[in-house]
Amino acid sequence: MDIKKGENMFFVGEDEVNPEAEIIFSVDDDGDYVVESTRVDDHLTNDGVGTQLVETMVEFAGQEDRKIDPQCPFTRDVMEKDDEMRKLIKN
């Protein structure tokens, strides 16, 4: 799966304007990431694309030495199920 970096997002597809899947984030006052939403088009559902987007976001945050505030329920669920990802959840 080719996941690309856009402005405050990671996405799958030709461009960030009309992505087939996306994880959207912002930066809070502490410089940490707030994941606002994750969306996957129907034709990619059940292919693990949403989880791959979360993994990409976690890897990015880890490289930047930042935490993640997962406001998106899907992102929170994925992160809470993995011991390493859970360490990056902002309390």
Image (tube, grey):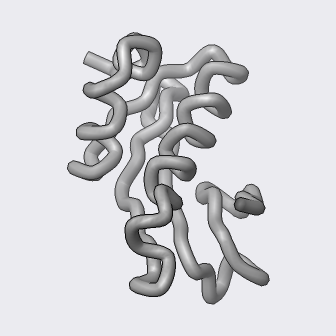
Q: Is residue 29 above or below residue 6?
A: above
Q: Is residue 88 above or below residue 5?
A: above
Seen in the picture, residue 52 relative to 33 is either above or below; the reply is below
Q: Quadrant of the C terminus?
A: top left
Q: Answer with left or right where residue 72 lies relative to residue 57.
A: left
Label count reads: 0
Pick the front one: 62 or 47: 47
Residue at 63%, 57% (x, y): give it.
10
Q: Residue at x 66, y 33 (%)?
A: 60
Residue shown at 24% from the left, 39% from the top:
77
In the foreground, 42 or 90 = 42
Q: Position of residue 88 (x, y in %)?
A: 43, 18
- Can residue 29 be spotted in the picture? yes
Residue 23 in the image, given as x and y percentages of width and height: 50, 58
The reply, left or right, for residue 54 in relation to residue 8 is left
Q: Residue at x 49, y 44 (%)?
A: 54
Name the spot of residue 12 as percent of width and height, x first.
Answer: 66, 70
Residue in front for this viewpoint, 1 or 38? 1
Give percent across and percent down for residue 90. Answer: 34, 20
Residue 23: in sight, yes or no?
A: no
Residue 46 found in image quarter: bottom left
**Residue 1, quarter of picture:** bottom right
